[in-house]
Amino acid sequence: MLIKIDTYAEKPIYEQLRDNILLGIASGRLAENESLPSARNLAADLGVNFHTVNKAYDALRRDGYIVMDRRTTAIVAARKTGESVLSAGLAAKLSLCAAEAICDGVDESAFAKICVESYKKIKGGGIQ
């Protein structure tokens, strides 16, 4: 599993880690029921604090993307299906993206095109 962490970025490391794992799941690089490294091993590999990895794993667990088991560590959860999984959290994130686009002068059709292209790129495994 290739994870890129930017220690100079404004985004907290645990969020970067969460995002990297989520992109891996969405693109198919991390398969359903695949075990993730233990928090201790991943922390050591990345050179980050164990609690940072735990925080990322907890966020992924809370959102239903991974399941945690004391014996088997973290496992990629079964994929959700259907429109019913569109959460309020996702809608809020998209609203912020739309607000930024509006402030930057991006029109509705260009914003929709960017959203669709991003979705297709990730779904097709094009994210690295």
Image (tube, rainbow, N blue to C red):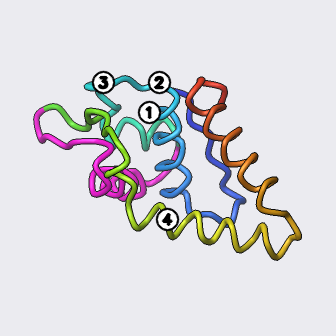
What is the crowding at mark 4: few (fewer than 14 residues within 10 Å), some, or many (at least 20)?
Answer: few
| Element carrying mark 4 | helix
Q: Nearer the viewer, mark 3 or mark 4?
A: 4
Which of disc 3 and disc 2 is earlier in sequence? 2
Report crowding for label 1: few under 14, some 14 to 19, many 20 or more residues within 10 A (C-alpha).
many
Vertical relation: 52 (above or below) 33:
below
Task: Check residue 28 in the rendering and tell me which mark sits there, or answer none.
Answer: 2
| Residue located beneath label 1 in the image | 25
Give whichever of discs 4 and 2 has the lower sequence position.
2
Q: Residue at x 70, y 60 (%)?
A: 9
Q: Secondary structure at mark 2?
A: loop
The answer to whether marks 1 and 2 mark residues whose Cβ atoms lie closer than 8 Å is yes
From the top left corner, tell me how far across and down residue 77 is, in percent: 26, 36
Q: Label 3 belongs to which residue? A: 34
Mark 1 vs 4: CB contact within 8 A: no
Amino acid bearing label 4: Ala
The nearer-to-camera label among 1 and 3 is 1
Q: Nearer the viewer, residue 89 or 9?
A: 89
Q: Residues within 10 Å of mark 3 (few under 14, many from 20)?
A: some
Give the spatial CA distance, label 1 vs label 2. 5 Å
Q: Residue furthest left?
A: 71
Q: CA distance from mark 2 to mark 3?
A: 11 Å
The residue indicated by pointer 4 is 91
